[in-house]
């Protein structure tokens, strides 16, 4: 928001220089992003054109005699609008100006132009750096004193404030004036809103119908007849230009001026171009189009709110007007719109049609529904004063969405607790009143506060306490010692676990990725999920829901890498998923997701062509669990995204903490993955954390006595998981280690059977085992396997 200080001072007088004011406003939370000081015209003063005569040697040039206070001088001038009696900006030789042809700074030098010596110049706006206008000279106000330095007449500063989304009131001169008044102790001067209403009753001339009150809680219409379209006054043009807006004509300039003044966007329709002279606020119909004032035809959807007449759309609500009803030089009757619109809908409309305007940037931040009436009256007053119009009696004010008045209770006790200093309600009162709040004393220490209508961000007690410290200054809060010792830092176990997993996985050659936590229904379906939690205002069609798992992001990342010839991809992500719950906030879970794809070995002369698969993922899980002092089991399970028969549940004790498997070919094709296996696993970190041992890591001495190795090949049912067999062997008497090394099906093995081979290590903690003792241990182990699984020793 560009704020010319000369304009700002009209509302609230202050003596601060631009940089001091910018600093004070920044400390108060309204950041002064840039300060531009207009002036520095050394050698340029106010002059009076005494006479204008023809140039003796050039038809297009004239000789202007100028009184500049210290004398008179005749200079050559080519401007067509120079005339005797004008107050102008006069520069003598040596002044620093902008070259009208090159646009670069230059020092004015004496020159002989067509045989006539010229020691000075009557300046245009471009030569003074005020605008690009170069055809005519700048004519100053008649009250400007001759000989006065131009800095004193036109010098100004413009502060560009970086306004945050919660402070749309500061996108207006009055909103900034209230801030300055609170900081300096000044009083805000309000513009006049009264005007003569000498026309017919407006209800006889137009009517307004709102068909969607949720998207348009209030619509005000005013009518000015007999207006004369022309340029706006110079003072208004100067203010608009300084604020970064281009003057167009008096009607449009007034709507822009009031928008900058009050922060309320307005729109002016040519009343005579509205079918039946009425307004209908409705949603667009499917297939409907509108040509906006920028000449672009725009296709509309039913989510877009329109301003229409009895026949067709005439404006995109809160964004831009339509070309068919815009004000032109032929306009004589103007219908004024001042309305409140749903900020979310305006933001979505602006995004969907790819059109952002000064109006939409304000509406999308959430404006007060009380603001339109003040802006409408101000605009009507200016229509009558500056356009020669006649105002209809009254305004049409349709207000179906009127909200109850806000009341916020604040206490000195709460303020003291938040700020760490002793405060009473009496300390808060003057600051809140300076910001426009109405104060009602509820008790000795409590205030009932009605925030001003333009401050939509003041809703709870802490907001009002923040206003106090913001205006008083954070540096005014005295330093206080802590009442006790600083609490010891207790690291989050979950964060520590995530850091450990990062280190372990990175050490294993994996790369961490961070994918979007937003997706859509199609993305959820591709990753085996259901309906996720929808967000209210998605930025894009593929970011409509919170993700239910990490799979979609990881598989999408793998596909992108494969398209770029990155075939050996090993990824992991530590991220959050969101499981909807019927009447509560979603269940947010921290998940580890790992995706492995590509050749098992890096390129070297003994490399095999085997790809990473289920067993590589399983081995990585076992390594991770071992580092965390955990031992997991893997039981067959089903998962929509993973390959049947190559999927297992990861279980710790009796709790399933995750799943591991190879990506189903159907889903691999859906992501355009290469024809090779991709292994995936995910683990719930909270479940993993709860399963971790709470005591410290303990070490066990290496066995002192020799071990005995036995290889057992047993035949079991084909469906029996090898891990169940290994678990039983591991629990056997004096078993120090178990390693599976072979699985066989085929010749000499029944079709419903398979052969599993394990290397078993027997070791006694107290003596050397004899062959007979080892045989006995083996027999007892085989007996248990036969009893539990029907296993037989393979012949």
Image: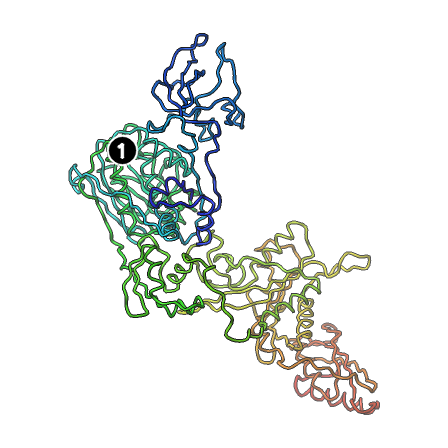
Closer to the camera in the image, 451 or 211: 451
Q: Is residue 705 above or below residue 428?
A: below
Q: Quadrant of the N terminus?
A: top left
Depth check: give the residue in front, 687 or 477.
477
- Residue 242 sits in which quadrant? top left
The residue tagged 1 is 386
* Residue 294 appears in the figure: yes
Q: Helix or strand or loop: what does disc 1 sit on?
A: helix
* Image quarter of the C terminus: bottom right
Which quarter of the figure has residue 334? Answer: top left
Tell me: 325 left or right of 180.
left
In the displayed structure, 111 sits above or below 161; it is above
* 90 or 264, nearer to the observer: 90
The figure's colour scheme reads rainbow
Residue 577's spot in the image, x, y percent? 52, 65
Residue 284 visible in the picture:
no
- Look at 50% across and 57% down and name the residue there: 519
């Amino acid at each position: 928001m560009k704020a010319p200080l000369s304009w700002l001072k009209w509302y609230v007088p202050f003596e601060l220089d631009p940089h001091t004011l910018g600093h004070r406003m920044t400390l108060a939370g309204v950041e002064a992003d840039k300060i531009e000081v207009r002036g520095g015209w050394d050698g340029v003063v106010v002059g009076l054109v005494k006479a204008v005569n023809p140039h003796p040697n050039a038809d297009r040039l004239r000789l202007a005699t100028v009184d500049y206070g210290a004398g008179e001088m005749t200079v050559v001038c080519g401007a067509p609008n120079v005339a005797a009696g004008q107050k102008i900006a006069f520069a003598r030789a040596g002044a620093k100006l902008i070259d009208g042809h090159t646009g670069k700074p230059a020092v004015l030098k004496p020159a002989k132009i067509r045989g006539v010596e010229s020691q000075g110049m009557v300046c245009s706006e471009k030569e003074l750096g005020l605008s690009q206008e170069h055809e005519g000279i700048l004519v100053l106000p008649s009250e400007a004193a001759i000989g006065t330095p131009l800095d004193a007449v036109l010098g100004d500063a413009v502060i560009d404030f970086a306004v945050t989304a919660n402070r749309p009131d500061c996108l207006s001169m009055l909103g900034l004036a209230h801030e300055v008044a609170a900081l300096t102790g000044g009083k805000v001067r309000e513009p006049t809103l009264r005007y003569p209403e000498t026309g017919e009753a407006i209800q006889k001339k137009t009517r307004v119908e709102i068909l969607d009150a949720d998207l348009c809680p209030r619509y005000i219409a005013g009518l000015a007849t007999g207006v004369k379209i022309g340029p706006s006054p110079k003072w208004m043009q100067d203010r608009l230009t300084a604020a970064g807006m281009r003057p167009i004509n008096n009607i449009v300039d007034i709507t822009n001026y009031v928008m900058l003044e009050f922060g309320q966007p307005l729109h002016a329709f040519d009343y005579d171009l509205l079918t039946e002279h009425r307004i209908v606020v409705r949603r667009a119909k499917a297939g409907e189009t509108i040509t906006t004032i920028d000449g672009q035809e725009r296709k509309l959807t039913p989510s877009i709110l329109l301003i229409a007449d009895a026949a067709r759309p005439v404006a995109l609500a809160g964004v831009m007007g339509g070309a068919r009803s815009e004000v032109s030089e032929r306009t004589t009757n103007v219908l004024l719109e001042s309305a409140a619109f749903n900020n979310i809908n305006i933001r979505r409309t602006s995004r969907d049609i790819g059109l952002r305007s000064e109006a939409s940037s304000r509406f999308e931040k959430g404006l007060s529904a009380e603001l339109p009436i003040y802006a409408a009256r101000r605009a009507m007053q200016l229509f009558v004063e500056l356009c020669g119009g006649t105002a209809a009696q009254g305004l049409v004010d349709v207000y179906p969405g009127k909200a109850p008045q806000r009341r916020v209770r604040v206490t000195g006790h709460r303020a003291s607790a938040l700020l760490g200093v002793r405060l009473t309600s009496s300390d808060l009162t003057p600051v809140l009143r300076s910001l426009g709040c109405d104060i009602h004393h509820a008790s000795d220490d409590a205030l009932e506060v009605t925030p001003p209508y333009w401050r939509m961000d003041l809703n709870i007690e802490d907001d009002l306490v923040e206003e106090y410290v913001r205006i008083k200054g954070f540096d005014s809060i005295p330093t206080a010692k802590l009442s006790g010792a600083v609490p010891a830092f207790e690291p989050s176990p979950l964060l520590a676990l995530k850091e450990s997993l990062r280190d372990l996985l990175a050490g294993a050659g994996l790369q961490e990725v961070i994918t979007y936590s937003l997706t859509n229904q199609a993305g959820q379906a591709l990753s085996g999920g259901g309906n996720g939690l929808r967000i209210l205002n998605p930025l894009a069609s593929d970011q409509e829901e919170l993700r239910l798992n990490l799979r979609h992001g990881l598989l999408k990342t793998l596909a992108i890498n494969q398209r770029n010839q990155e075939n050996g991809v090993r990824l992991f992500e530590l991220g959050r998923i969101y499981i909807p719950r019927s009447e509560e906030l979603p269940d947010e879970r921290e998940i580890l997701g790992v995706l492995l794809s590509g050749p098992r070995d890096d390129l070297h002369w003994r490399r095999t062509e085997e790809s990473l698969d289920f067993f590589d993922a399983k081995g990585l899980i076992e390594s991770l669990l071992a580092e965390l002092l955990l031992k997991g089991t893997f039981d067959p399970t089903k998962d929509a995204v993973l390959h049947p028969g190559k999927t297992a549940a990861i279980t710790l004790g009796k709790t399933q903490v995750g799943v591991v498997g190879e990506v189903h070919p159907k889903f691999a094709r859906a992501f355009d993955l290469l024809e090779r296996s991709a292994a995936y696993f995910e683990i719930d970190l909270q479940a993993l954390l709860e399963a971790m041992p709470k005591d410290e890591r303990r070490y066990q001495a290496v066995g002192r006595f020799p071990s005995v190795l036995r290889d057992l090949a047993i035949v079991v049912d084909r469906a029996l998981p090898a891990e169940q067999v290994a678990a039983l062997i591991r629990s056997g008497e004096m078993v120090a280690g178990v390693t599976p090394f072979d699985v066989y099906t085929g010749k000499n093995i029944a079709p419903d059977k398979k052969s599993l081979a394990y290397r078993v290590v027997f070791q006694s903690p107290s003596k050397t085992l004899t062959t007979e003792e080892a045989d006995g241990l083996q027999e007892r182990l085989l007996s248990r396997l036969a009893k539990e699984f029907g296993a037989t020793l393979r012949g």
